[in-house]
Image: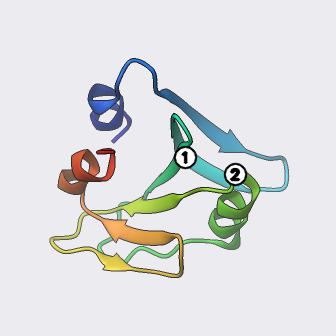
Amino acid sequence: MVEQIANQLPRSARMNFYRTAAGTEMDVVVEMGQRKIGFEAKFSSAPKVTKGFWQACDDLQLDAAYVVAPVAVGWAMKTPGSVISVMDIVEKLQP
């Protein structure tokens, strides 16, 4: 998943990860201008996120957060989150 994201980013974008000692984490954080997007990888077709995912969304003040999972069709979660497939990454990185 990290490679798919990195290959789609414009040169001006920055890509990092976020983890705290308390267990708050986001696998990939992309900053493109004023837009900040988080991606969390899960290997379940019924992915569940932890409290740490939502805390990372708050800490980072993300515009969008995506759980990338092996699903055919994604679904919305609590704002700013959604479950998406790997194939949807390119679309989510568009301006």
SS for dot 2:
helix
Q: Residue at x 38, y 36 (%)?
A: 2
Counting every numbered tag in the picture gives 2
Q: Residue at x 53, y 70 (%)?
A: 80
Residue placed under numbered mark 1 in the picture:
36
Q: Position of residue 10 (x, y in %)?
A: 34, 25
Badge 2 amino acid:
Leu
Front in this rendered view, residue 35 or 39:
35
- The quadrant of the rendering that contains the C terminus is top left
Q: Would residue 20 be found to the left or right of residue 10 on screen?
A: right
Q: Would residue 12 be found to the left or right of residue 71 on screen?
A: right
Q: Position of residue 72 (x, y in %)?
A: 15, 71
Q: Position of residue 34 (x, y in %)?
A: 56, 41
Coloring basis for residues: rainbow
Precedes in sequence: disc 2 or disc 1: 1
In contact (CB < 8 Å): disc 2 and disc 1: yes
SS for dot 1:
strand
How crowded pointer 1 is (Cα within 10 Å; few <14, some 14-19, many 20+) is rated as some
In the rendered view, would you say 47 is above or below 95?
below
Q: Residue at x 52, y 34 (%)?
A: 33
Q: Would residue 92 be found to the left or right of residue 36 on screen?
A: left
Q: Which mark is residue 90?
A: none
Q: Position of residue 91 (x, y in %)?
A: 23, 51
Q: Which mark is residue 60?
A: 2
